[in-house]
Image (cartoon, rainbow, N blue to C red):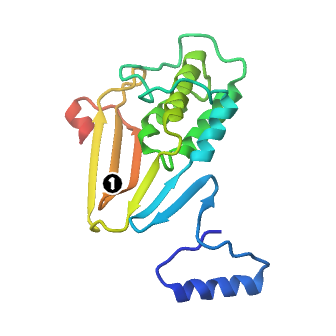
Amino acid sequence: MVITGNNEVEIKNLKAFLSSQFRIKDLGPLKYFFGVEVARSKAGSTICQRKYTLDILEEAGLLGAKPTKVPIVADLVLTPAGSSSLHEPATYRRLVGKLIYLTITRPEIAYTVNTLSQFMQDPQPHHLDAAYRLLRYLKGAPGQGLMFSSQSELHLIGYCDADWARCPITRRSVTGYCIFLGNSLVSWKNKKQVTVARSSAEAEY
């Protein structure tokens, strides 16, 4: 359990109450929780999933692979057809599931993971190849994560964009956004739109 707040007295009271009801052990300041590593300094807090990333690479047998600079080729369009199904589709599904959890601290792979997750029903070799390329990208900087500054101003800034008719099958557009609190990225998402936009302006809107 992680207890957080800005009132030290209330935190101590909650710990005392939990201790009176259950057998608990206070592990002190948060350092590691469900694969997320936390580090603090005067500049702020940093979270990453370095060990979790290395475990994924080890399971896939790519610890010694040559890193790539980008998670996915810019003009690559994955389709549900093109080759035969994988002999063990569970391997692909398990890998993509782990990559989804990795987007907690790696927002730059959100688009790639969103694309890969669309082929869970019938994964094929070219889908797995794209997933392995993403792993090689992660190999380049497994400890990369998010920095939450303690010194920036508390003002919200949001950015959004849309890729018109990105999906060649459904012709639906893809929307992405990110929101910063000061200099810290606090929210982001990448999702295929529900309806088919008839123009780039409609997709952006």
| Relative to 205, residue 149 above or below | below
SS category of the residue bearing label 1: strand
Q: Is residue 54 left or right of residue 45?
A: right
Q: Position of residue 178 (x, y in %)?
A: 34, 49
Mark 1: amino acid: Ile
Dot 1 crowding, Cα within 10 Å, few <14, some 14–19, many 20+: some
Q: Position of residue 26 (x, y in %)?
A: 69, 76
Q: Which residue extends farthest left?
A: 201
Q: Is residue 194 left or right of residue 197?
A: right
- Residue closer to the observer: 195 or 115: 115
Q: Is residue 91 left or right of residue 46?
A: right
- Residue found 36% across the figure and 23% down from its top: 74
Which quarter of the figure is the N terminus placed in? bottom right
- Residue found 75% across the figure and 76% down from its top: 24
- Residue found 64% across the figure and 37% down from its top: 56
- Residue closer to the observer: 67 or 2: 67
Q: Quadrant location of residue 120?
A: top right
Badge 1 is on which residue?
Answer: 179
Q: Position of residue 28 (x, y in %)?
A: 63, 73
| Relative to 196, residue 150 above or below | below
